[in-house]
Image (cartoon, rainbow, N blue to C red):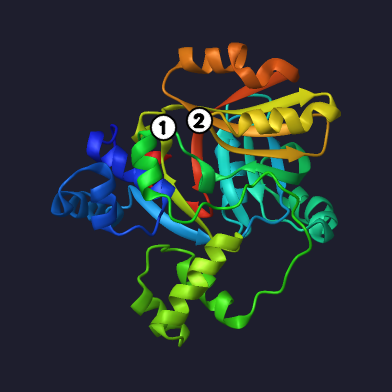
C-alpha cells in the first residue's frame, strides 16, 4: 500500500480520529462533501485495511521495553516482542536500542517479565525496561491537523477524558460492559444492532452503555493507520530528560504538539518517551531544536523508526513493514 492518501481520504481519516463511530452522513455534513462520495471512500478505506477503528478500555499501567540485539537481528527481536499477546506497539529502531515495544504489564507482573520472560527472547544482547507512570497521549488523542477547526468541532460528540491523568484504582468492569468492549476491540464501528446481537442487550441499552463508556473514558476509540499514508513518513522515538519537577510542564506541552502520536512518563533516567511523526527530516530537525516543549528539557535523544511490526495491538500490513 504505497504512496499517501488523497485529500478527501485524509480528511475522512481525520474525521474518524475525532469520532470513530460517526456515521458517514454526519462525516459528510462536517466535511461539506456528498454523502455517497464520503461513504464510498470511507468504506473502501476500511475494507482494504488502510484504516482500522478499534475500541480499547482506558489505558492501564504498562511498560516500555527496549532491546539491544545482536548485529543484524533487530527485526528478530522486535518480532519476538510483537508476537506477545500483551504487546501494544513494536518498532525496529536505528539507534542504541535495536527495537522498542510497549507492553501491557501490570507492576505485579514486572518481576516475572524482567527476570523470566525477557532473557528468553532471541537475539538479545541487552535490554531496558521502564514502567509507564502516566500516559501523556495515545492514538485516541492523536490529531495531526487533517481537519479545520470548524470541521473538527462539527464532529465532536464525546470528547474523551484527558489522558495525562493518574491511572487511579482499577475498577471492575461489569459483564455487559466487558462484552461490549470485547465486541468493539477489533472493530470500533460495529453498529448498535450488531452489538445488541452479540451482547444480548437491547439496542437502546447498547447505545446508552457505549455513550457512557466513552464519556467516562472506559472506552477509547483509536484509529489505527500508518502515519506515512497521511504524509508523515518520518518517525522517531524521542526520549526526554528534564528535571523531575518539570515533567508535568513538559508533558502538558507535548499534548499540544500535533507531531506527537504517543507519549508516556516513565521510570528511569529519562522522564518521558514519545513517538513522533512528521513529514520531512527538516520538520524533525525543527521539532527537536525549536519546539515549545523543549523549554524545560535538559536532553532529548531521537532514534528513527525504520519499521513497525505492531501498532495499537494490531499487526501492521506487510507493505507497512
Query: Is residue 155 visible in the rendered structure shown here?
Result: yes
Q: Is residue 16 left or right of residue 42?
A: right
The label on residue 283 is: none
- For the residue pair 140 and 64, the one nearer the viewer reads as 140
- For the residue pair 187 and 22, the one nearer the viewer reads as 22
Q: Position of residue 313 (x, y in %)?
A: 53, 54
Name the residue beneath numbered marker 2.
258
Q: Residue at x 80, y 27 (%)?
A: 246
Is 284 above or below relative to 239? above
Q: Position of residue 229 (x, y in %)?
A: 34, 36
The label on residue 145 is: 1
Query: Is residue 6 visible in the rendered structure shown here?
Result: no
Tell me where residue 206 sits by quadrant: bottom left
- For the residue pair 211 and 9, the one nearer the viewer reads as 211
**Label 2: which secondary element:** loop
Q: Quadrant of the C terminus?
A: top left
Q: Is residue 286 left or right of residue 294?
A: left
**Label 1: which secondary element:** loop
Is 247 above or below relative to 206? above
Amino acid at each position: 500500500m504505497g504512496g499517501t492518501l488523497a485529500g478527501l481520504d485524509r480528511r475522512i481519516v481525520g474525521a474518524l480520529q475525532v469520532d470513530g463511530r460517526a456515521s458517514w452522513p454526519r462525516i459528510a455534513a462536517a466535511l461539506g462533501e456528498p454523502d455517497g462520495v464520503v461513504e464510498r471512500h470511507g468504506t473502501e478505506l476500511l475494507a482494504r485495511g488502510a484504516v482500522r477503528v478499534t475500541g480499547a478500555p482506558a489505558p492501564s499501567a504498562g511498560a516500555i521495553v527496549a532491546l539491544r540485539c545482536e548485529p543484524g537481528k533487530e527485526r528478530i527481536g522486535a518480532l519476538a516482542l510483537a508476537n506477545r499477546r500483551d504487546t501494544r506497539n513494536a518498532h525496529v529502531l536505528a539507534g542504541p536500542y535495536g527495537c522498542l515495544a510497549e507492553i501491557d504489564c501490570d507492576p505485579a507482573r514486572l518481576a516475572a517479565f524482567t527476570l523470566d520472560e525477557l532473557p528468553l527472547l532471541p537475539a538479545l544482547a541487552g535490554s531496558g525496561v521502564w514502567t509507564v507512570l502516566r500516559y501523556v497521549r495515545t492514538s485516541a488523542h492523536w490529531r495531526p491537523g487533517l481537519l479545520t477547526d470548524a470541521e473538527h468541532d462539527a464532529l465532536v460528540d464525546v470528547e474523551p477524558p484527558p489522558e495525562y491523568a493518574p491511572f487511579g484504582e482499577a475498577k471492575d468492569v461489569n459483564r455487559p460492559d466487558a462484552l461490549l468492549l470485547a465486541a468493539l476491540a477489533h472493530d470500533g464501528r460495529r453498529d448498535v444492532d450488531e452489538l445488541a446481537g452479540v451482547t444480548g442487550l437491547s439496542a437502546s441499552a447498547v447505545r446508552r452503555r457505549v455513550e457512557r463508556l466513552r464519556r467516562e473514558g472506559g472506552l477509547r476509540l483509536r484509529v489505527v493507520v500508518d502515519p506515512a499514508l497521511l504524509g508523515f513518513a518520518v518517525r522517531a522515538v524521542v526520549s526526554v530528560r528534564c528535571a523531575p519537577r518539570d515533567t508535568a510542564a513538559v508533558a502538558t506541552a507535548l499534548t499540544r504538539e500535533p507531531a506527537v502520536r504517543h507519549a508516556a512518563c516513565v521510570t528511569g533516567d529519562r522522564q518521558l518517551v514519545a513517538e513522533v511523526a512528521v513529514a520531512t527530516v527538516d520538520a524533525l530537525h525543527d521539532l527537536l531544536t525549536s519546539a515549545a516543549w523543549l523549554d524545560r528539557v535538559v536532553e532529548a535523544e531521537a532514534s528513527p523508526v525504520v519499521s513497525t511490526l505492531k501498532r495499537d495491538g494490531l499487526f501492521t500490513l506487510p507493505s507497512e513493514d
